[in-house]
Amino acid sequence: MKIEELHIYHVAMPLIDPWITSYGADYEIHSILINGVCDGYEAWSETCALELPTYSYESANSIYYNISEVFGKKIIHNEYETPENLNNDLGLYKGNPFAKAGLEILWWTLASEINNIPLHKLLGGTRNQVKAGADFGVEKDIDTLLQKIQPAVDNDTPRVKLKIKKGWDKQVLEAVSSTFPKTLFHVDCNGGYSLEDIEFFKSIDKIGLAFIEQPFEPEDLIDHAKLSKILETPICLDESINSINKAKQALEIEACKYINIKPGRVGGITNSLKINSLAEENGIPTWIGGMLESALGVSICIALATLNNFTYPGDLFPSSRFYKNDLCEPINNFKSPYIFEPSKKLPKPNKEFLKKYTIKEAHLK
């Protein structure tokens, strides 16, 4: 495969409500969309690490710069028989998995288009449906949170994820677990705690959470391993797993019992597949994460979630959950709010919305 043209778009999509976590509030989701052309075929990819370097050291601006000024110029017009070949060329550059993922995912979506094979089939997916859960950020008060959770419970969500941070944690968990005692919950700390907070974690150890997601800073694999051995509640790693090597290290020291895989965070689909295989070999379940992408990014995540070992309900949502107007054609392939089918054809951007939400764009030829 030889990519002959690249169109790169930095877009900002307004959220219905602010998304508040331990690292702040996002009012828009900044994504990078890439359109690639090969032998008369075209396809799209999406990669998103948020507007500012909060979730990751990458940001929308850094991703846009690296793809349009460095990585894109490195790979355009080169022949890549496999995505590994493309990754090897980008291996010259340190880090920046979200930026690399944009181009690596584009290889896969082009391959899907050229071969007329649905992406999930191309990846080796084995399921025609995937389960998703419901996610809730930090709210202005507990009553508001409970009111927002109620419809999810009424619609039989298989699990609920709660964002927590210091000052919005133990009381919230006690209120939620007592109000919805039959619902499965897990918490996402987004790295906002440390081992100094061990008493807090011990105090919630008997609540019955599915797991505690990313309690410490991404680099703290050793401290995650220590916490994992202290608590009965499993630990799940998210931000810490940004490469195949980090996954190997985490598994070796038993730092977690679940792994969240976001294709952008780990450098693309190929790395996602390899990390999933490593986890499966070690008896560690995985689940698919999201970055509040458009319907395009969500559809790519759904395709990945059809593989074996993606057994915990993922972060997958209909467009109406976060956006009044999705940049891409809204996903309509859900059997219920929490059961999705993979797309035979990936959605493409709405031209009107693409123009409306684009902050800047570049064209490589």
Image (cartoon, rainbow, N blue to C red):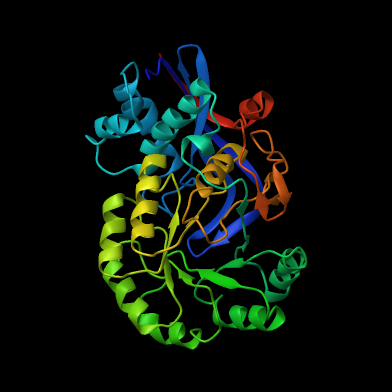
352 to 193, vertically: above or below: above
Give the quadrant of the N terminus: top left
Residue 213: % across, % down:
46, 67
Residue 129: % across, % down:
62, 49
97 to 236, vertically: above or below: above
Q: Is residue 67 visible?
A: yes
33 to 2, vertically: above or below: below
- Give residue 152's quadrant in the image: bottom right
Residue in view at x 39 percent, y 33 percent: 104
Drawn side of residue 311 relative to residue 86, left or right: right
Of residues 64 and 40, the one drawn nearer to the viewer in this rendering: 40
Of residues 349 and 197, the one drawn nearer to the viewer in this rendering: 349
9 to 193, vertically: above or below: above
Q: Is residue 62 visible?
A: no
Q: How many marks?
A: 0
Of residues 173 and 23, the one drawn nearer to the viewer in this rendering: 173
Residue in view at x 41 percent, y 50 percent: 53
Of residues 327 and 212, the one drawn nearer to the viewer in this rendering: 212
Residue 357: % across, % down:
61, 32
Residue in view at x 72 percent, y 54 percent: 337
Give the quadrant of the C terminus: top left
* Extreme residue toward the left, this view: 92
Residue 355: % across, % down:
62, 25
